[in-house]
Image (spheres, rainbow, N blue to C red):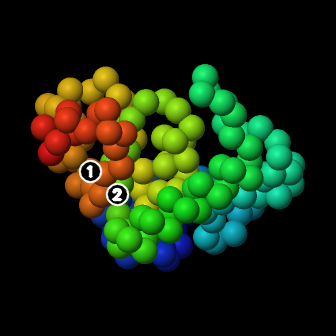
């Protein structure tokens, strides 16, 4: 299988793939496995589902409440716009995500992917040294962090 040209401006991830002779064989023989050359999985997972199932259906649940598909679409679009317009996120840039497992973290992940970025999600329990290792390996251009976890992120930079 040959890779299609990518929309990524930042080719960090693609440049670090193993040689093609080490890849598995990708078979897309079934009709339901035929995808367009370019596909944004966040838009497919969220926007297409919202349009098909209805914006008022529950999407993300937590102890703090439930977000509908419509609310989640609007919030992820807002976050994606902030990432691209205010912070200059380019397709292929890595964005470190740090926070508790909640709807905002899920929305941030979807927003990064919608904006063309690569989400590098970290566990909230990581210590600064572990964060530093991840930062060194992934070289993120941005970090989105819940303020409660900011001190460890700053120490791990």
Q: Nearer the viewer, residue 28 or 103?
A: 103
Question: Where is residue 65 drawn, in percent x and y?
Answer: 66, 30
Mark 2 packing: few (<14 Cα in 10 Å), some, or many (20+)?
A: many
Q: Nearer the viewer, residue 50 or 113?
A: 50
Question: Where is residue 15 drawn, in percent x and y?
Answer: 31, 64
Q: Is residue 113 left or right of residue 97?
A: right
Quadrant containing the C terminus is top left
Q: Is residue 96 left or right of residue 3?
A: left
Secondary structure found at label 1:
helix
Residue ID for mark 2: 94
Q: Is residue 48 left or right of residue 79?
A: right
Query: Which image quadrant for residue 87?
Result: bottom left
Quadrant containing the N terminus is bottom right
Q: Residue at x 31, y 23 (%)?
A: 125
Residue ID for mark 1: 138
Q: Residue at x 43, y 71 (%)?
A: 84
| Pointers 1 and 2 in contact (C-beta within 8 Å) | yes
């Amino acid at each position: 299988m040959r890779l299609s040209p990518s929309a990524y401006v930042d080719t960090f991830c693609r440049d670090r793939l193993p040689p093609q002779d080490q890849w598995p064989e990708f078979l897309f023989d079934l009709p339901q496995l035929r995808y367009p050359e370019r596909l944004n999985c966040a838009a497919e997972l969220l926007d297409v589902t919202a349009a098909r199932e209805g914006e008022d259906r529950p999407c993300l649940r937590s102890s703090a409440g439930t977000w509908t598909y419509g609310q989640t679409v609007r919030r992820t679009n807002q976050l994606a716009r902030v990432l691209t317009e205010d912070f200059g996120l380019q397709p292929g840039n890595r964005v470190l995500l740090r926070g508790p497992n909640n709807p905002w973290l899920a929305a941030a992940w979807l927003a990064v992917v919608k904006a063309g970025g690569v989400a590098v999600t970290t566990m909230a329990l990581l210590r600064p040294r572990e964060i530093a290792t991840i930062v060194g390996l992934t070289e993120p251009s941005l970090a989105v962090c819940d303020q409660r976890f900011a001190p460890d992120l700053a120490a791990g930079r």
